Image (tube, helix red, strand yellow):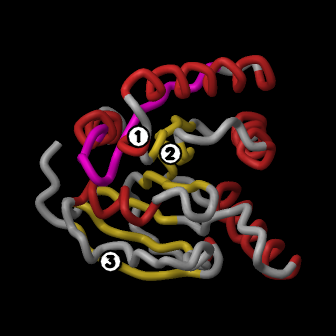
Amino acid sequence: MIIKSSDFIKSSSKSIECPKNDIPEFAFIGRSNVGKSSLINMLTQNKKLAKISGNPGKTLLINHFLINKNWFLVDLPGYGYAKISKKEKKKIENIIIDYFTQRVNISLTFVLIDIRLKPQLIDIEFMNWLSNNNIRFKIIFTKEDKLKLNQKNENASKYINEVFQKLKIYPEFVVSSSKTKKGRNEISNLILSEI
């Protein structure tokens, strides 16, 4: 898929404020500091689309970007950042739950995972919640450029096997790097197949 246009439409604090357009939405979500904004900018080839911050937990709203005038890329708040209050964590959790339970145009959700890390409880719990709520998702492993070649495939396989052991689901995945643009075509094709 060739991305010809990518435009920020609006930020919303709840699903009822989100755009009313009846077009497919593709949600991007993951733990804070997983490289979500960098991946979105790499995918759209627009370095200024999603704001990249050195401070994790910067995205606190539902951000809608209109791509090619016919689908939305949705940047959701990162979860699991330790250095915020319980009140802020609950607020983020409520935004995420509200989005996924109220929006009807979600075609596919991409859960971003840092390929260098072992499965974290918060990610496993989130994928379990998505599965239990019949929300389709695929995993995007980020930051693969930070690993040696033999570690890349090994880490991804181990991770997926552990997800299967714990949740009895075997999610499809893409290995990516915002730096090298690895995974861009695969992610684009997954989106294209759903439009």
Tag in front: 1 or 3: 1
Q: Position of residue 130 (x, y in %)?
A: 70, 42
Q: Quick check: 170 above or below 16?
A: above
- Look at the image and tell me whether residue 17 can be seen: no
Q: Position of residue 80 (x, y in %)?
A: 73, 61
Name the residue that disc number 3 marks.
8
For the stretch drawn in magenta, the main secondary structure is loop
**Image point (54%, 46%), residue name:** 114
- Residue 73 highlighted magenta (yes or no): no
Segment colored magenta: 170-183
Name the residue that disc number 2 marks.
110
Name the residue that disc number 1 marks.
144
Mark 2: few/some/many CA within 10 Å (<14, 14-19, 20+) = some
Q: Amino acid at mark 1?
A: Glu
Mark identifier at residue 185: none
Q: Is residue 80 left or right of residue 68?
A: right
Mark earlier in primary sequence (1, 3): 3
